[in-house]
Amino acid sequence: MSTPSLTARPAVLADIVPGALARDLALIAAGAGLTGVAAQITVPVPGSPVPMTAQTFAALLVGAALGWRRGALSMVVYLLVGAAGVPWFNGGTSGLYGASAGYVVGFVFAGALVGALAGRGGDRTPLRAAATMVLGNLAIYVVGVSWLMASTGFDLATALDKGVAPFLIGDAIKIVIAAGLLPGVWALLGRFNRS
């Protein structure tokens, strides 16, 4: 059994793990599970029906690490299992309803987008990783704010005020962490492969 080599330049981090279907199924389930665990890190936001959670960070990292297909599938599993009643949405909730459900739907699109960009090297340098995470956050915001407007009757300005503005600083911090973490992992793997 050989050790995976980086000389073939894997598209995403998950590609260094040996295997095929069993690997992919395990990674998809692990990505959904990580997002579910991260959703339990919840901070209420005064004046907003949407809490601040770590699940957006997890969803974006899962997309980057797994690539667009596995990343999107992982978020579909997360969404469907939570919609079916497993209490792993924010704060131990389940069901696909309420003001914050659109953000969970947005994770599917963000996982695919971030995964596609990572597959093209969008996670290899801090600047590219930051841009990739910004675009992933925008995908989550577009779906989340649209859902928020539909579920609450908010106009666009109110939805942006309650569903985006309170999260910008936290998301900026998450982007900075991801912009250091992802290229750092690639650098470590490169060193490991050279030794």
Image: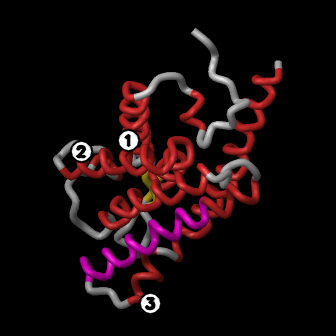
Residue 12 spot, x, y in % from top left: 59, 41
* Lower position in the chain sequence, tag 2 or tag 3: 2
Residue with the mark numbered 3:
157
Tags 2 and 3 touching, CB below 8 Å = no
- Is residue 68 positioned above or below 185 on the image? below
Rounded to the nearest angstrom, the CA distance separating label 1 from label 3 is 32 Å
Q: What is the three-letter code of the residue carrying label 1? A: Ala
Residue 144 spot, x, y in % from top left: 38, 70
* Closest to the observer, 27 or 6: 6
| Residue pictured at 71% horizontal, 58% vertical | 128
Q: Main secondary structure of the magenta part?
A: helix
Which labelled disc corresponds to residue 81? 2
Q: Residues within 10 Å of mark 3 (few under 14, many from 20)?
A: few
Location of residue 24 by image quarter: top left
Magenta-span inclusion, residue 54: no
| Residue pictured at 76% horizontal, 51% vertical | 125
Residue with the mark numbered 1:
32
| Residue pictured at 36% horizontal, 47% vertical | 73
- Is residue 32 positioned above or below 27 on the image? below
